[in-house]
Image (cartoon, helix red, strand yellow):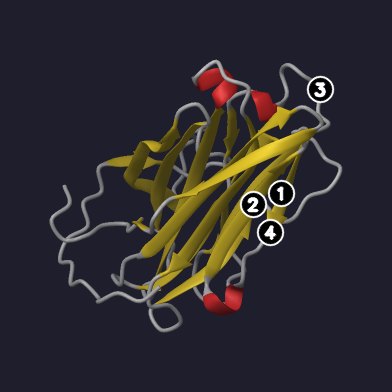
């Protein structure tokens, strides 16, 4: 996605999350650590009665004390929550598919997509998201990693990402026509948590555009009826001029 560059003189780092194997498991460290930059919250992002709601929260962290003076790394944790009509509106609509696309803005010169997770899954009930960035002087072999997991029973992750165009993209395909009822992901509130890493030249900041969608379906006699909704493009920048 193309957009004009913005000159930013100051990055406001509001709270700190030390080095850890998990963003939620805080441990003291003298080496590289993450600082929280900001959250983007769209709750709801999409809302349609009687079909359901799609909620989005994106948390951005920056790697500090990495020993590399020429580059920065930004970690994105994306939380996509679908609330089908069965939950939101007491209807018979269920979640069939979700879509999430993230494009690094003006990529390839000052910004690069360098890691993402998960990749395409098959036959598993839990997926672990593991994100890594180089840390320490070049050639040191030191790396910084974070990880978290989320459940995918009766859900298949489809990876449509592409490093060559710096795009992190996923679909979550629900087994709405065959999974057990009630209590499966398609007829319950479901939370997916993919993530990715953007590397930038120092102080270039991370500019990302995101777009999301959801397909809901319902049984009608012996077939299923479907509707699809998609958001517009959202700016998910680490910091924009005028932010506080």
Residue 184 visible? The answer is: yes
Q: Nearer the viewer, mark 3 or mark 4?
A: 3
Quickly name the residue at label 3.
180
* N-terminal label among 2 and 1: 1
Identify which residue is drawn at 43% across, 57% down: 210
Q: Considering the image in quadrants, where does the N terminus appear? A: bottom left
Residue 154, image quadrant: top right
Q: Nearer the viewer, mark 2 or mark 4?
A: 2
Q: Find numbered disc 2 in the image and state the secondary structure of the residue it sits on.
A: strand
Q: Find numbered disc 1 in the image and state the secondary structure of the residue it sits on.
A: strand
* N-terminal label among 3 and 1: 1
Identify which residue is drawn at 66% across, 46% down: 172
Find the distance from the CA under tag 3 to the CA under tag 1.
19 Å
Quickly name the residue at label 1.
157
Is 47 above or below relative to 35?
Answer: above
Quickly name the residue at label 2.
171
- Looking at the image, do the residues carrying marks 3 and 2 touch, with CB atoms under 8 Å apart? no
């Amino acid at each position: 996605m193309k957009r004009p560059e913005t000159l930013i003189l100051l990055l406001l780092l509001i709270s700190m999350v030390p080095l850890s194997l998990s963003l939620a498991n805080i441990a003291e460290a003298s080496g590289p650590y993450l600082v929280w930059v900001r959250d983007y919250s769209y709750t709801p992002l999409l809302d349609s009665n009687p079909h359901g709601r799609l909620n989005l929260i994106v948390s951005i962290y920056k790697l500090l004390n990495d020993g590399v003076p020429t580059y920065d790394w930004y970690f994105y944790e994306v939380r996509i929550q679908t609330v089908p009509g069965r939950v939101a509106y007491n209807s018979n609509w269920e979640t069939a598919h979700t879509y999430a696309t993230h494009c690094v803005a003006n990529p390839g010169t000052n910004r690069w997509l360098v890691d993402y997770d998960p990749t395409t899954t098959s036959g598993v009930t839990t997926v672990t998201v593991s994100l890594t960035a180089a840390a320490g002087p070049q050639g040191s072999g030191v790396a910084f990693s974070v990880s978290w997991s989320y459940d995918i029973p009766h859900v298949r992750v489809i990876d449509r990402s592409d490093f060559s165009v710096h795009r992190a993209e996923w679909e979550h395909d629900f087994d709405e026509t065959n999974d057990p009822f009630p209590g499966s992901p398609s007829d319950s509130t479901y939370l997916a948590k993919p993530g990715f890493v953007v590397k930038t030249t120092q102080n270039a900041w991370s500019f990302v555009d995101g777009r999301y969608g959801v397909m809901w379906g319902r049984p009608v006699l012996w077939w299923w009826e479907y509707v699809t909704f998609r958001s517009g493009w959202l700016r998910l920048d680490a910091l924009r001029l005028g932010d506080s």
